[in-house]
Amino acid sequence: MNRLYHVPLSPFCRKVRLVLAEKRIEVELVEERYWEMDTDFLRRNPAGKVPVLRLNGKILSESMAICEYIEEVYPDPALMPYSPEERYEVRRLVSWFDDKFHSEVTQNLLYERVNKKLMKSGYPDSKAVKMGAQKIKYHLDYMAWLLDHRRWLAGDRMTLADFAAAAHLSALDYISDVDWNRSEVVKDWYAKIKSRPAFRSILADQIPGFPQPPHYSDLDF
């Protein structure tokens, strides 16, 4: 059986979950407390990180490598464009969210508010939370600029870039840390992607100790 070892609110795991669901690849979701450094898990990925995907007998790690592997093996529906220039733009934006957005926003909000409690590693750092709350405004404005010029983040078609962004924002939306009123165009984009069948399992997530806000699974916000 195909299995994805994951953490529900991890944006990297969510990105892989969205790709799998969009391509209608069935997997069993197995929650992995990777911070406990379980020996069996370390055998699957010595880096000690999620996601780890067991697909057709192969063990795959690192979210972008997993997504590109899936794209090559299961090309339909396509989540990467055909031209080198367009593929470059998708990869650039995936890196933007998984690197810059992650370090400036996700780590300062989600990790401080949720991960520290789950890992029992202390209390939220108020300075970090304040920094994340400031930085997300810049990123939402950048997304608004992109979407003023394009139908989707990387161009005229939905791509892996949209899933990378939605993975981070959906995790933050679970803890009500996204101001959707800041940009109508970003809100409309998220409403479109949130309404896709691939998003259903993401919207069904329930994290013990962190109840869903009322708007989280509402397709009309």
Image (cartoon, grey):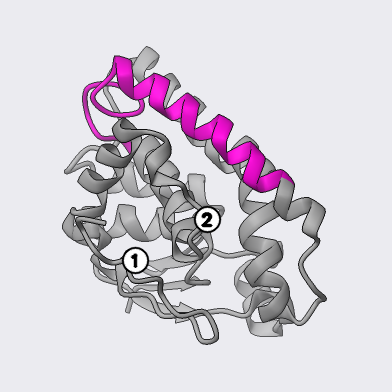
Q: Position of residue 167 (x, y in %)?
A: 43, 52
Q: Quadrant of the N terminus?
A: bottom left
Q: Is residue 149 left or right of residue 166?
A: left
What label sits on residue 177 in the rendered view?
2
The residue most toward the front is: 181
Name the kind of residue labelled 2 in the image: Asp
Q: Position of residue 177 (x, y in %)?
A: 52, 55
Given residues 55 and 93, the one toward you in this image is 93
Whether label 1 touches label 2, CB < 8 Å? no
Name the kind of residue labelled 1 in the image: Ile
Q: CA distance from mark 1 to mark 2?
A: 17 Å
Determine the residue positioned at 32% across, 56% down. Answer: 18
What label sits on residue 163 in the rendered view?
none
Q: Which residue is mark 1?
A: 202
* 23 falls in the magenta region: no
Q: Crowding near pointer 1: few (<14 within 10 Å), some, many (20+)?
A: many
Which range is magenta?
131-159
